[in-house]
């Protein structure tokens, strides 16, 4: 099932703008509609202004009018499968209803499957804002 997501994530990773870290990341999100959205990391000379691949994919999904994630795939050229950073876990959790599979992968093809709940147990969510 995640095979097509891998193709999308690997392809968009090639577009990453990572001249500072030289660490290119690609992310592909399948929305519950079935549509796939992709993003890559985009760095900046003012380092903190860079954005992660996951954030780019989320932005593309929301811009297309979708707000519910069914599956996530993240790939990098690291030796071990790349886990979403803490900030991206929170960003992804905003759009996950229930639990979804997150596949973390290397370009070489090593995959590790986990879930949003495992990545971010006890997430802060909108319910806390209701008092
Ligand atoms: N990066 C991502 O795009 N996603 C992650 O989940 C981990 C880190 C990017 C941010 C930065 O451009 C580079 O990888 C090195 O940290």
Image (tube, helix red, strand yellow):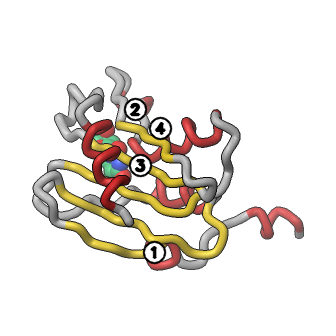
Residue 81, quarter of picture: bottom left
* SS assignment at label 1: strand
Point out residue 103 in the picture as x, y percentages from the top left corner.
Answer: 35, 65
Question: Quarter of the picture for ligand 1?
Answer: top left
Point out residue 49 in the picture as x, y percentages from the top left corner.
Answer: 44, 29
Q: Which residue lies most toward the right here?
A: 131
Pick the quarter of the image with the N terminus.
bottom left
- Residue that carries the numbered disc 4 in the rendered image: 56
Q: Earlier in the sequence, mark 2 or mark 3?
A: 3
- The span from disc 4 to disc 2 (Cα, nearest Å) is 11 Å
Q: Residues within 10 Å of mark 4 (few under 14, many from 20)?
A: some
- The span from disc 2 to disc 3 (Cα, nearest Å) is 18 Å
Q: Which residue lies most toward the top here?
A: 45
Tags 4 and 1 touching, CB below 8 Å? no
- Residue that carries the numbered disc 1 in the rendered image: 115
Pick the quarter of the image with the C terminus.
bottom right
Q: Is residue 15 above or below residue 87?
A: above
Point out residue 80 in the picture as x, y percentages from the top left corner.
Answer: 16, 64
- Residue that carries the numbered disc 3 in the rendered image: 28
* SS assignment at label 2: loop
In this picture, residue 52 sits left or right of residue 30: left
Q: Nearer the viewer, mark 1 or mark 3?
A: 3
Q: Earlier in the sequence, mark 4 or mark 1?
A: 4
Is ligand 1 within 8 Å of the beta carbon of the residue shown at mark 1? no
- The span from disc 4 to disc 1 (Cα, nearest Å) is 20 Å
């Amino acid at each position: 099932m995640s095979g097509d997501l891998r193709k999308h994530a690997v392809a968009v990773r090639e577009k990453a703008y990572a001249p500072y870290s030289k660490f290119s990341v690609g992310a592909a999100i399948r929305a519950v509609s079935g549509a796939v959205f992709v993003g890559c990391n985009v760095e900046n000379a003012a380092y903190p202004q860079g954005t992660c691949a996951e954030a780019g994919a989320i932005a593309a999904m929301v811009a297309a009018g979708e707000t519910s994630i069914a599956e996530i795939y993240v790939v990098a050229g690291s030796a071990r499968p790349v886990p979403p950073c803490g900030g991206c876990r929170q960003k992804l959790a905003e759009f996950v209803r229930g639990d979804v599979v997150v596949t973390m992968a290397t370009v070489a093809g090593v995959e590790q499957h986990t879930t949003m709940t495992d990545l971010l147990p006890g997430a802060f969510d909108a319910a806390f804002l209701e008092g």
